[in-house]
Image (cartoon, rainbow, N blue to C red):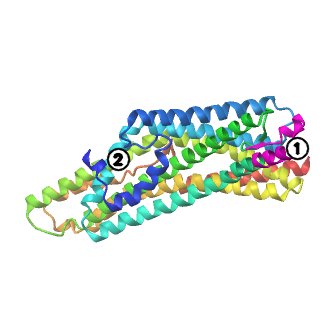
Amino acid sequence: MDSCKTWNKEMTREFFPYKRIMWPVGSWPVDSSKNFAKLRALFVTVTLALMVAYLSMEIGYHDGANLNLIIDHFTLITIGTLTIIKISIIRLHRDDLSKYMCNAASDWIYVAQRDHREVMLRYANLGRFVFFSQMCSSYIVIIPLIAESLLSFVTMSSLQNITLSMSVEEMRVIKLPHDMICPFNAQVACFGICIVQAVQLISLATGNCGSDVFLFGICMHLCGQLEILGLQLSRFHEGKGNDSWGKTKLVALIERHCLLLNLAKDIVDTLDIILSAQLIFQASLICIIGLQFIVSLAISDFFLVVRSILSFGILMIQLFLYTYVGEILSLRTQAISTAIYLSKWYDLPINITRDICFIMFRATYPVYIRVGKFYNMDLNTFKTILKASASYFSVLRIMFTQY
């Protein structure tokens, strides 16, 4: 466990951004303050649960709400529920993820060869790119909502300084971040609700996208370690010719292979429920966004058309990250067999060659990230979902054209 506390420069560069995002929501797996982490996770979960409950009642009891407002609230409800699930699952698998972080710290400490370090840096840079692009995009979406609400409050305060006799309706023009009018007449109450909703939106973006990029980052590190293992196995024949030395080296590589497979199994178990919820909720969001897109085209509201296209693109990017991880992880585990075959195994002693056959046989069964333990998440799955979404949009367009 000392390696969890000892981070070198490369380990800090790869995982410190994830720590900055996961720590506030209580999902950082190697947090030393366990009780405080539970309180933070409980606070975020309760905050988002209140948002989901309130917006659900707003949809159910608000008779004058238009379609766009209902879609916006339904989107927040869906993403809020999904965020609660992600935070809860990561908390439940905290021990497995903590063990993974300890192994990652050891990988950076004990990496010696230059090409191995380059492989690790390549995957780390990919994870950092996804982290900054996704987190910046999520905050860019919510910051205008919060800024608009605060600006309306400041505008109302300046108007109140000019005119003291204001009607009740004028007191309720403050626009809240959840795209709704303040239900109270007092400015203090409206400002308090504005702050609470701002915290909810920030927690929503941090918990949802933060969990995605964190899981993507640890999967990329694992893929890097599998590629390094393939390089080591392809050069297994190099070095001393002593049988005992070759047997010792092979045993070390086998133990390393088993360790990486166990870590991959822990990650797959963590992603199982998350991906099941992700597909279910994203399928409903795609249906709602498709309806908004077709209605916007019918009424020639090009602002909503662009907004629907951007929303659909964000959903597809989020889904693509998981399918990309599943594709790379399966390829890297399967490439172990090819790496051994490319080595000069035919020059090795017969007892070592016999053990190599077992490694090759195990590597022919790659690790898949599955949804519900039966549906593989890979690029073929992403293409299938994309084609199904396009077919759904076409059917909706034909229905609106006819009726």
The residue lying toward the viewer, choosing from 79 and 48, is 48
Q: What element carries label 1?
A: loop
What crowding class fits label 1: few (fewer than 14 Cα within 10 Å), some (14-19), or many (20 or more)? few
Q: What element carries label 2?
A: helix
Residue 350 part of the magenta segment: no
In front: label 2 or label 1: 1
Report the label total. 2
The residues colored magenta run 153-176
Residue 134: image location, x then y, percent: 57, 56
Q: Residue 42 carries which label?
A: none
Q: Is residue 45 above or below residue 309?
A: above
Q: In this view, does 362 lie to the left or right of 211?
A: left
> Residue at position x 45%, y 55% from top?
17
Q: Is residue 21 left or right of residue 402?
A: left
Residue 143: image location, x then y, percent: 66, 52
Q: In this view, does 127 lie above or below 203?
A: below
Q: Is residue 149 above or below residue 225?
A: above
Q: Which of marks 2 and 1 is nearer the N terminus?
A: 2
Residue 172 part of the magenta segment: yes
Disc 2 residue type (three-letter): Tyr
Disc 1 residue type (three-letter): Thr
The residue lying toward the viewer, choosing from 159 and 138, is 159
Residue 357: image location, x then y, percent: 24, 55
Q: In this view, does 109 lie to the left or right of 396?
A: left
Residue at numbered disc 1: 163
Residue at numbered disc 2: 100
